[in-house]
Image (tube, rainbow, N blue to C red):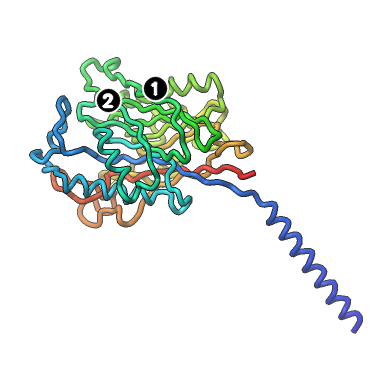
């Protein structure tokens, strides 16, 4: 009886010690703040007004797309629906900031951020009119709760330096700001020249655009190789193309990335056949965010990289026809398709230890 009682007491003591150890271990677990930022090609996000000196006639009520106010506000509603959900499974505030492409002007962005699904976030706008003949530019929206703009400007991509009679293309949008009150961040929003005319023929144009970003990034890294940079956009190139590997010199693994270097988290996605837009039964991953080494170490005061994601929900997919299971685009040639975009958005999550 005494032996049995002694064993029982030992078991209780062991249980109490185990529970105490578990409690101490749990109490010592680190806590983190999480935030998210993204990029989205908004696919021909025009207003309905025929602007002088801009090739936007097809996106007017009298144009080939018969683009009227009803369609415009329908598109705004669809885009707001998507943007309001990006990253919400990771953070209740959604995207802290987002780069975007294929916007005609500031007005369309103002209409978008004032939509009821986004208005509470108080998104602010950075935009400059560029030289693209179609009148589409890059833009940037940000939640001032997270981000404070210190400086911004547009960087000209002058393709005539390599092809004398080539048409003007989109500027690169540059923004410098403070994120979360702790991190100085440099952001480049890109929309590189398309592949129209052939991938190989047009590759030098994208390489040239990549060099514009790279020169500015290198100048920042010469001052401080731990500078936090984000180079995002619709690059019209995949993560393994020369513009990414040879020009930007991106690595595909965090542990291969050195101070002053760039890490591309989208390589593994692409090698698995996962993309953000589809064509001829092939997925491409043009919509990327490339981040600098400064985002990678965990033992820092500021935010660090956690993960990269493609936002792809069932309602954003084309259900029938030759584009089945591709992103549900706004237009099927000149016919309104009541979609969202021909690209899926992408986003990155970052963490900061709460001390």
> Circles 1 and 2: CB distance less than 8 Å?
no
Q: Tell me if residue 17 comes above or below residue 168 in the rendering.
A: below
250 sits to left or right of 76: right
266 sits to left or right of 205: right
Observer-nearest of 107 and 217: 107
Residue 197: horizontal and vertical position, in percent? 22, 30
Residue 14: horizontal and vertical position, in percent? 80, 67
Mark 1 to mark 2 CA distance (whole Å): 19 Å
Helix, strand or loop status at disc 1: helix
Measuring 46% from the left and 36% from the top, which residue is drawn there?
147
124 sits to left or right of 331: right
Q: Which residue is mark 2?
A: 130
* Residue 306 badge: none
- Which of the marked residues, 1 or 2, is nearer the chain's N terminus? 2
**Quarter where residue 215 is shown:** top left
Residue 108: horizontal and vertical position, in percent? 25, 38
Residue 305: horizontal and vertical position, in percent? 53, 40
Q: Which residue is mark 1?
A: 211
Measuring 44% from the left and 27% from the top, which residue is drawn there?
248
Observer-nearest of 107 and 339: 107
Measuring 62% from the left and 36% from the top, which residue is drawn there?
300
**Quarter where residue 105 is shown:** top left
Q: Tell me if residue 14 comes above or below residue 221 in the rendering.
A: below
Instruction: Say which quadrant the N terminus sits in.
Output: bottom right
């Amino acid at each position: 009886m005494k032996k049995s009682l002694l064993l029982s007491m030992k078991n209780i003591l062991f249980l109490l010690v185990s529970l105490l150890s578990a409690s101490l271990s749990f109490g010592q677990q680190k806590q983190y703040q999480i935030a998210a930022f993204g990029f989205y090609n908004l696919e021909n996000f025009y207003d309905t007004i025929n602007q002088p000196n801009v090739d936007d006639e097809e996106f007017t009520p009298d144009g080939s797309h018969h683009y009227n106010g009803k369609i415009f506000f329908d598109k705004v509603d669809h885009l707001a629906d998507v943007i309001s959900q990006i990253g919400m499974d990771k953070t209740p505030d959604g995207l802290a900031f987002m780069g975007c492409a294929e916007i005609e002007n500031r007005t369309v962005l103002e209409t978008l951020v004032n939509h009821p699904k986004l208005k509470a976030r108080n998104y602010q706008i950075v935009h400059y009119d560029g030289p693209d003949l179609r009148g589409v530019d890059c833009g940037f929206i940000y939640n001032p709760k997270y981000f404070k703009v210190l400086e911004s400007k547009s960087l000209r991509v002058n393709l005539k330096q390599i092809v004398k009679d080539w048409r003007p293309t989109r500027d690169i949008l540059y923004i410098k700001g403070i994120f979360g009150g702790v991190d100085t961040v440099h952001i480049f929003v890109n929309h590189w020249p398309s592949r129209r005319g052939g991938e190989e023929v047009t590759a030098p144009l994208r390489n040239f655009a990549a060099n514009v970003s790279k020169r500015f990034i290198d100048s920042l890294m010469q001052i401080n190789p731990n500078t936090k940079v984000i180079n995002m956009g619709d690059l019209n190139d995949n993560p393994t193309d020369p513009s990414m590997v040879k020009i930007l010199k991106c690595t595909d693994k965090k542990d291969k990335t050195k101070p002053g270097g760039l890490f591309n988290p989208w390589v593994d996605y692409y090698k698995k056949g996962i993309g953000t837009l589809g064509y001829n039964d092939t997925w491409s991953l043009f919509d990327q965010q490339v981040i600098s080494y400064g985002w990678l170490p965990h033992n820092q005061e500021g935010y660090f990289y956690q993960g990269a994601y493609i936002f792809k929900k069932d309602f954003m997919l084309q259900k029938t026809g030759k584009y089945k299971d591709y992103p549900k685009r706004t237009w099927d040639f000149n016919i309104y398709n009541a979609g969202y975009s021909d690209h899926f958005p992408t986003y990155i999550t970052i963490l900061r230890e709460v001390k």
